[in-house]
Image: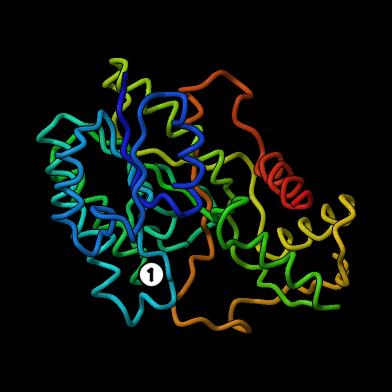
Amino acid sequence: MAKFLILGKNGQVGWELQRALALRGEVLCLGRHDEGGDLSYPEKVAAAILNFCPNAVFNAAAYTAVDKAETEDKEAYLINAQALQPIASACDQIGALLVHYSTDYVFDGSGQTPRTEEALPSPVNVYGASKLAGEKVILDSGCSSLIFRTSWVYGVHGKNFIKTILRLGQAKETLNVVNDQVGAPTSAEFIADVSTALAIRVLSGEKSLLGTYHLVPDGETDWCDFAKWIISNAQELNYPLTLSAQAIKGIPSEEYPTPAKRPRNSRLDNNKLKGLFPKQSIHSWDTYARRVLTELAGI
């Protein structure tokens, strides 16, 4: 029976990985407060890997406070990059596959077309730079790895944009949301299912699949239209709201300043990923978002 270790068990992706891997083998789930689960102490994480000796390590742990990273850069780099050196080394030592999750923020957000995996990274904030550094640590380590870049993650568990809009939709009658940042909202469930499927294939002998992938659904939207979509569909599900989609106004990023600069173009080209699955098996972003919204409306 295969053995899997999940780091970041309480995050959005980590939570869904527990479900995705539950019937695949023995699963050890570690969070920040568990022994060997805090990436601030990477040597302890490495020791936990060597002790459990899994076939694959799913690293869903990360420093994700994008704005705080501008001033907490040492912590961001420690967790997102430096900690990966002993983790990757431990995986290499026991021949384990390292599955790691990265971000569209490794790119600068210029242009209007989706970035491929071969596009030159150029992050515009500390968070993106720390995640890019983490990718390099893994690749330089020589361990067997799958690196998945994703964007605009949301899910039933944890804090995310859908939950924020639903909360504001119960308290406000008007809302301003930026409309000049474009990307693909990506379900944590989708991320967990796809990354698990590829990991299992690698462990079954398809070593040619090792590498970096853009793990996003089809389609694109901007934050304002995403917010309108959430409110409109929540109304159809009889979610109690004071806000209507028509009362959401789009504004430029300049009118909503943040400590960390955000990429305007967060589009990721997913054709490399789609080529590994049957046609029509990866759907538009709203298909997955509707599933999560339906579940949230029933909670």
Q: Which residue is drawn at 78% across and 52% down?
A: 297
Residue nearest the observer in this picture, 107 or 52: 52
Left or right: residue 140 versus residue 74 is left
Q: Picture quarter containing residue 131?
A: bottom left
Left-right relation of 140 to 10: left
Out of 59 and 174, give the one closest to the viewer.
59
Which picture quadrant has residue 66?
A: bottom left
- Please give the name of the residue rendered at 65% of the width and 76% of the height, measured from the top-left corner: 252
* Residue 111 visible, this orientation: yes
Looking at the picture, does residue 279 appear above or below residue 76?
above
On the picture, is 260 further left or further right than 209? Answer: right
Q: Position of residue 203 (x, y in %)?
A: 30, 21
Judging by the rendered image, the residue that carries numbered circle 1 is 124
Front-most of residues 191 and 270: 191
Q: Residue at x 26, y 50 (%)?
A: 135
* Quadrant location of the N terminus in the rendered image: top left
Question: Residue flagged by tag 1: what amino acid is it?
Answer: Val
Relative image position of residue 136 (x, y in whole percent): 21, 51
Residue 118 seen in render: no
> Dot 1 surroundings within 10 Å: few (below 14), some, or many (20 or more)?
some
Q: Disc 1 on helix, strand or loop?
A: loop
| Residue 148 in the image, given as x and y percentages of width and height | 39, 42
